[in-house]
Amino acid sequence: MKFISTRGQAPALSFEEAVLTGLASDGGLYVPETLPHFSKETIASWAGLSYQALAFEIIKPFVDGELTDTELKAIIDKAYASFRHDAIAPMVQTGHNEWVLELFQGPTLAFKDFALQFLGHLLDHILAKRNQKVVVMGATSGDTGSAAIEGCSRCDNIDIFILHPHERVSEVQRKQMTSVLAPNVHNIALKGNFDDCQNMVKASFANQSFLPEGRQLVAVNSINWARIMAQIVYYFYAALALGGPHRPVSFSVPTGNFGDIFAGYLASKMGLPIEQLIIATNANDILHRCISDNDHSKKPLVHSLSPSMDIMVSSNFERLLFDLYDRDGAAISGLMEEFKSGAMTLSDAALAKARELFSSHRLDDQAMTRIIGQVYEQTGYLLDPHTAIGVEAARVKRKNTHTPMVCLATAHPAKFPEAVKQATRHVEPALPPHMADLFERKEQYDVLENDTAAVQQFVAKNIRA
Ligand SMILES: *Cc1c(COP(=O)(O)O)cnc(C)c1O
């Protein structure tokens, strides 16, 4: 399968090349040239498959010819072996026809493990085959960093450097990153905010001359195609468990960079009957404003109690726009040029198409806190702040109660104990047993100045031979 850029100017790539490349040379994002499509009969025949077996069926068409069935199965099995629950993505009922899909059973207790456990093993496999070594560099406001580190910590062919804003991630999040003491793992606490971290990573990708001969940077942020691909699986898995594909299912997704919910959109395009996809945002609501008011304009970042959704711009939205504009790369290039001024306006046709499947809702911290308390009181179930936003958005925006509503639980409540305690009047969400000693674990990280040259020097010095 070939992968093409959303801006139409970069060369088409193979699957392996797309995974190693990240951002396209024209500034666009890679998407498959054509999507696989599964018939209702085929999807129905997958009922009862294990998560891993289902993942194989869904991922196979994307990698056909580049990975053998045996190789793909081995990568999937390794990726999900680190999950604690046999179901990998179990569901819990929280209301009438309302379900929470627990995507936090992986090693770092957030949904990003689904993609990054897979990506780590996939990359290591591709690199070993090519006899190549790479450097992973990324910026994190919390969950991506720990999931990427866990995903890459056992990879022989990867050195990983993760920047986080010094003293601006939760203690659980920091500990999860900095207590991985592998020789190829480096945590950088940058004296700046998340955008400084991200800008530094961007600058490093743009000019990689600071790296030793023969090394290149690989992006493991959510623009990496393999991450999106791995996330498609749980939409099918949840729908199959609730009577799909014979009846439609809806999903509500706590959204930041639009990677998670974009995978749901792909599932729908690939043949899964989905009635609604609800974009749930916190006060950083660019996507909610875009879908509801055609206002896609940058606003200053707000620090919320759901920090993994604190973004000003959702990078993966460009992939949806590409489809909304009938895959016209020149049109997307033009839109992105317009957006450099800080705002862009979608065409009526594009917006109408988006609204056929997507709706959106925004919640501030106060409303989010209320819903954690309410669900706990009614059911005894603890939501994390991100998941809570999705649950309330689902309740406000759902069109009918006959269609099962699946709310994606993107993080374990114990990752955000302060917010949960405040919302429930002091219920302390316990860490799962395998992480109970997290706060006693030894940490290793370096605090660096907000200075690109200093960070790049640090990276170059610490790459293994
Ligand atoms: C990353 C993250 C999100 C947002 O996912 P996107 O793919 O960026 O939209 C939501 N919740 C949690 C807990 C996350 O870690």
Image (cartoon, rainbow, N blue to C red):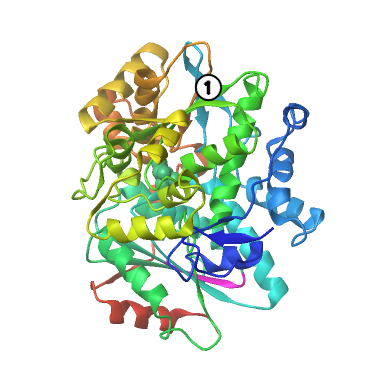
Rendered residue at 49%/87% (across/down): 212
| Residue 184 position (above or below residue 270) | below
Q: Mark 1: give few (<14), some (14-19) or many (20+) Cα within 10 Å.
A: few
| Residue 456 position (above or below residue 350) | below
Q: Quadrant of ligand 1?
A: top left
Judge from the rendering whether residue 79 lies leftward or rightward of residue 153; answer left or right. Answer: right
Residue with the most extreme bottom position: 213
In what element is the residue under mark 1? Answer: strand
Q: Quadrant of the C terminus?
A: bottom right
Judge from the rendering whether residue 200 lies leftward or rightward of residue 121; answer left or right. Answer: left
Amino acid on which disc 1 is placed: Val
Judge from the rendering whether residue 322 lies leftward or rightward of residue 141; answer left or right. Answer: right
Q: In the rendered image, which quarter is residue 27 located in?
A: bottom left
Q: Does 362 appear in magenta?
A: no
Magenta stretch in the rendered image? 156-161
**Of 350 and 64, the residue lying toward us:** 350
| Residue 456 position (above or below residue 278) | below
Judge whether residue 441 can be spotted in this image.
no
| Residue 58 position (above or below residue 208) | above
Judge whether residue 448 can be spotted in this image.
yes
Rendered residue at 33%/33% (across/down): 385
Rendered residue at 49%/68% (across/down): 9
Q: Quadrant of the N terminus?
A: bottom right
Q: Position of residue 107 (x, y in %)?
A: 53, 47
Rendered residue at 49%/67% (across/down): 24
Q: Position of residue 165 (x, y in %)?
A: 27, 60
Instruction: Give the residue pinned by disc 1.
Output: 92
**Of 426 and 152, the residue lying toward us:** 152
Q: Position of residue 79 (x, y in %)?
A: 64, 51
Q: Main secondary structure of the magenta part?
A: strand
Mark 1 vs ligand 1: CB under 8 Å?
A: no
